[in-house]
Image (tube, grey):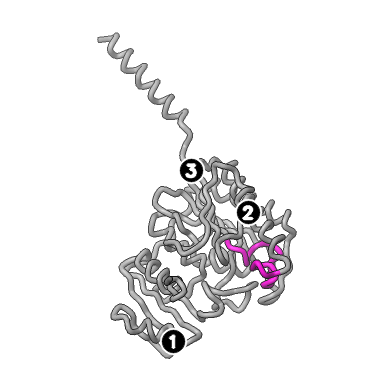
C-alpha cells in the first residue's frame, strides 16, 4: 500500500513539473494601418504613387516590427500580422522573422482583422486613424473617405478600430493596445475601454501633425505593447448586444438606392441604409460584400 502511495505521489510530481515546464500559449494578432504611422500626413506617404511612399512603408513595417518584438519579449508564442492599408501589400514581409504569419491583400473575411478567431489572446492596432465623424485627426475617415459619411453600430458612430474590436469581441478576444495620432487613440479607447495607447503624433489638421520621429514611435509602441500584455487579464472583449444594427450613410445615391432593393435592407433617409444582423459576424459579412463587390471582379 505504501509503495503504491509513493508511486502515485511520484507520478503526480512528474506530471506537475511537466505542466509547469510547458510554455504558456500567448497568441497575438497585430492589425496594421498606415494613416496613423508617425510622420504620415498626406497622400504622398500613403499610396505607391506618392513620392514618399517607399520610405513610409519601411516606417510602417518598423512600427509593426516594434509591436511584434515587444510581444515576443512579453511571451507571445504565435503572431499574426495583418496588412490593413490600401491594397494590403504595404509591409515589407522579408523583414519579419520566419515564425510570424502575415495576411496580405483583399478581399478577405473580417477585413482589417482577418484571421481572428477564439484561439487568440489579444489584438493590437498599429497605425490607426480617427473616424469620418471626428472633426480632428490626420486623414480621418471610416473605411472610405470618398464614399461614406457615417458608419454606426447599434446607434453609435464607430471608428474602424471599434468595428474591428467588435469582431474580435465576438470571439471573446480583447483589444489591448492602439497606436496612432491623439484623435485616433482617444476615439478608440473611449469606445473600446481602458486600453494602452501610443500617441505617435498630434493632429494639427486633416493634413498636418506634430509627430514623433520613426525611432521614437517604435520605442513608444514597444513600451505600450509590453505594458498591455503585462496586464492582459485586466482587459475585457468589446461585445455588442445582439441583434446588431448597422447604419451607413453614403455620399452618392446609387449605392444605397440599389442596396435598398434587398428585403433585408431598410432605406432610412436620402443617403442612408440600415441592416440588422443576428450578430457582429453577420454584419461584418454583409459589409464585406458591400465594400468588395464590383463588376470589375467579373471576367
Give how far apart the Cα atoms at labels 1 and 3 are. Answer: 46 Å
Answer few, some or many: residues within 10 Å of disc 1's Cα (few below 14, many 20 plus, some between 14 and 19).
few
Question: Quadrant where the N terminus lies?
Answer: top left
Query: Can residue 176 be spotted in the picture?
Result: no
Instruction: Provide the secondary structure element on which disc 1 rests.
Output: helix
Left or right of residue 55: residue 252:
left
Dot 2 corresponds to which residue?
A: 92
Dot 3 corresponds to which residue?
A: 26
Instruction: Provide the secondary structure element on which disc 2 rests.
Output: loop
Instruction: Provide the secondary structure element on which disc 3 rests.
Output: loop
Query: Which is nearer the N-term, disc 2 or disc 1?
Result: 2
Question: Quadrant where the C terminus lies?
Answer: bottom left
Going by the picture, which residue comes out furthest to the left? 1
Dot 1 corresponds to which residue?
A: 254
Query: Is residue 91 covered in magenta?
Result: no
Q: Residue at x 61, y 62 (%)?
A: 127
Give how far apart the Cα atoms at labels 2 and 1 are. Answer: 38 Å
Residue 193 in the image, given as x and y percentages of width and height: 50, 61
Answer few, some or many: residues within 10 Å of disc 2's Cα (few below 14, many 20 plus, some between 14 and 19).
some
Give how far apart the Cα atoms at labels 3 and 2 are. Answer: 24 Å
Answer few, some or many: residues within 10 Å of disc 3's Cα (few below 14, many 20 plus, some between 14 and 19).
some
Residue 267 in the image, given as x and y percentages of width and height: 36, 85
Going by the picture, which residue comes out furthest to the bottom? 270
Image: magenta residue range: 33-50
Foreground: disc 3 or disc 2? 2
Amino acid at each position: 500500500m505504501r509503495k503504491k502511495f509513493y508511486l502515485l505521489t511520484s507520478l503526480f510530481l512528474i506530471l506537475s513539473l511537466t505542466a509547469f515546464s510547458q510554455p504558456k500559449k500567448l497568441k497575438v494578432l497585430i492589425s496594421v494601418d498606415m494613416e496613423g504611422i508617425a510622420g504620415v500626413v498626406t497622400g504622398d506617404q500613403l499610396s505607391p504613387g506618392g513620392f514618399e511612399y517607399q520610405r513610409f512603408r519601411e516606417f510602417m513595417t518598423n512600427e509593426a516590427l516594434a509591436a511584434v518584438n515587444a510581444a515576443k519579449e512579453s511571451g507571445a508564442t504565435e503572431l499574426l500580422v495583418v496588412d490593413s492599408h490600401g491594397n494590403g501589400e504595404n509591409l515589407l514581409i522579408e523583414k519579419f522573422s520566419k515564425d510570424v504569419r502575415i495576411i496580405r491583400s483583399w478581399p478577405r473575411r473580417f477585413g482589417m482583422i482577418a484571421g481572428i478567431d477564439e484561439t487568440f489572446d489579444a489584438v493590437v492596432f498599429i497605425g490607426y486613424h480617427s473616424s469620418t465623424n471626428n472633426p480632428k485627426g490626420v486623414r480621418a475617415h471610416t473605411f472610405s473617405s470618398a464614399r461614406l459619411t457615417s458608419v454606426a453600430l447599434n446607434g453609435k458612430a464607430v471608428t474602424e478600430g471599434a468595428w474591428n474590436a467588435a469582431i474580435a469581441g465576438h470571439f471573446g478576444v480583447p483589444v489591448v493596445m492602439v497606436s496612432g495620432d491623439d484623435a485616433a487613440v482617444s476615439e478608440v479607447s473611449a469606445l473600446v475601454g481602458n486600453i494602452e495607447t501610443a500617441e505617435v503624433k498630434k493632429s494639427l489638421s486633416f493634413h498636418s501633425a506634430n509627430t514623433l520621429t520613426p525611432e521614437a514611435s517604435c520605442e513608444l509602441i514597444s513600451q505600450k505593447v509590453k505594458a498591455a500584455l503585462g496586464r492582459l487579464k485586466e482587459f475585457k472583449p468589446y461585445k455588442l448586444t445582439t441583434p446588431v444594427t448597422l447604419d451607413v450613410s453614403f455620399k452618392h445615391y446609387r449605392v444605397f438606392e440599389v442596396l435598398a432593393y434587398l428585403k433585408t435592407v431598410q432605406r432610412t433617409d436620402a443617403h442612408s441604409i440600415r441592416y440588422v444582423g443576428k450578430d457582429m459576424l453577420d454584419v461584418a459579412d454583409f459589409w464585406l460584400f458591400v465594400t468588395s463587390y464590383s463588376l470589375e471582379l467579373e471576367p
